Image (spheres, rainbow, N blue to C red):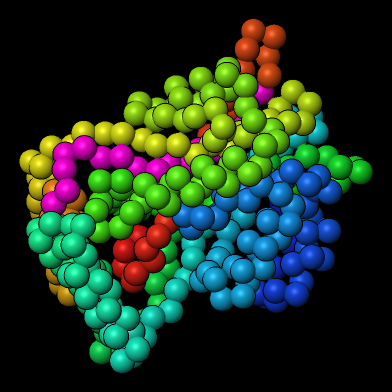
Amino acid sequence: MNEIIDVLMKLQKGYDEKIPDNAPSLMANIFSNRQDLLTFGTGTNELCFSRDEVMELIRSDWDGGWGDFKMDIPNAVIEVDGDVAWFFADCTVKYHYEDTQENYAYFAETAYEYATNEKATPKQRLSHINWVFGLRFHQRADGKREYLLRAEFSGMLIKEGGNWKIVAMHFATPKPDYPDSRFEDTNRDYVSEYESQKIKFDSYPQNVANDKIVELMNDIESGLSFERQQVRVLEYGDFMWVMAVGVQKKVISEDEVLNGSLQDIKRLHESDLPSDEKLYLMKRSTAYALKEISSDSKFTWQVRVSAIVEKKKDGYVIRHKHLSYPCDWIIEGKL
């Protein structure tokens, strides 16, 4: 167990120092020599199917692609079964924001792009503009602020040359309201983005899951759907890391969405938060609700699942699972 904690601490040190040129030495030190490493990053297109792609993800994180990432290693859940281990850790990512004319210009341009999107209805355009403004206008007197956002991190290790080595990882940023990539959102073509990921899966023909594994993943939660080509496995003995990208479908009525926001406002009013924080969060919840009902009562989201699966005589057993949605928006106060 202490050896695995040491691996996580070395990875954390790399994220603390953020020296992109150190990525190859870290990979050599704590990652497996296998070429078929699998990893989910937080971004929509951050799917890693090889050792080189994992290294480039880490390098980009250290080169300004992410905030200050911290794992809660002392409270991480670690399980070991022979020469295979897996872990889950709550994390935080610290972001720094500053009120500048450049930032204002960026959001003004975003509002303009939504306003001129002829594929969306006027109702959808204005609801999205309202949502962006509700997320953005969270100012402080000094014009600068820091946010500590939640994150999650899980992964699998194997014994290689007598040492524990990472073979798979899953980074995620939980959301309190709705996932980003709703297919019914006509302000952005999330369907095409999802299809582009399917193309990447097609370009990586190795390690496709068998039908039993696909069936197991589809049964994890109601509304989930995974195609066989988008379920990949990394096997080691009787264990495997399963990496799947699919869709989740739900029907949520307009009244459910609106009443959920009204309940949020009631809870916020009764909370001990400062009044300015209450007002901001009330605005955010209202903006989310109006944005979501501007499309439809049908919700289709891109979903990601990773799992530790053990081979048994009578089938397969899930020992760990991690479900998340890819992140497109990191605007202050969103997460």
Across and down, in percent, residue 221 comes to 40, 27
Vertical position of residue 236 compared to residue 78: above or below: above
Across and down, in percent, residue 130 comes to 15, 67
Q: Is residue 291 left or right of residue 33?
A: left
Q: Quadrant of the N terminus?
A: top right
Q: Residue furthest front?
A: 118
Q: In which quarter of the view is residue 247 placed?
A: top left
Q: Is residue 260 left or right of residue 89?
A: left
Vertical position of residue 171 compared to residue 1: above or below: below
Residue at screen point 18% across, 62% down = 118
Across and down, in percent, residue 140 comes to 27, 84
Q: How many marks?
A: 0
Across and down, in percent, residue 225 comes to 42, 29
Q: In which quarter of the view is residue 83 placed?
A: top right
Q: Quadrant of the C terminus?
A: bottom left
Residue at screen point 54% across, 71% down = 65
Vertical position of residue 100 compared to residue 297: above or below: below
Q: Residue furthest top?
A: 314
The answer to whether residue 235 shows anywhere in this view is yes
* Closer to us: 165 or 268: 165
Span of residues in magenta: 294-310
Q: In which quarter of the view is residue 55 placed?
A: bottom right
Residue 258 belongs to magenta span: no
The answer to whether residue 267 shows anywhere in this view is no
Residue at screen point 51% across, 55% down = 45
Q: Residue furthest right?
A: 161
Residue 308 belongs to magenta span: yes
Q: Main secondary structure of the magenta part?
A: strand
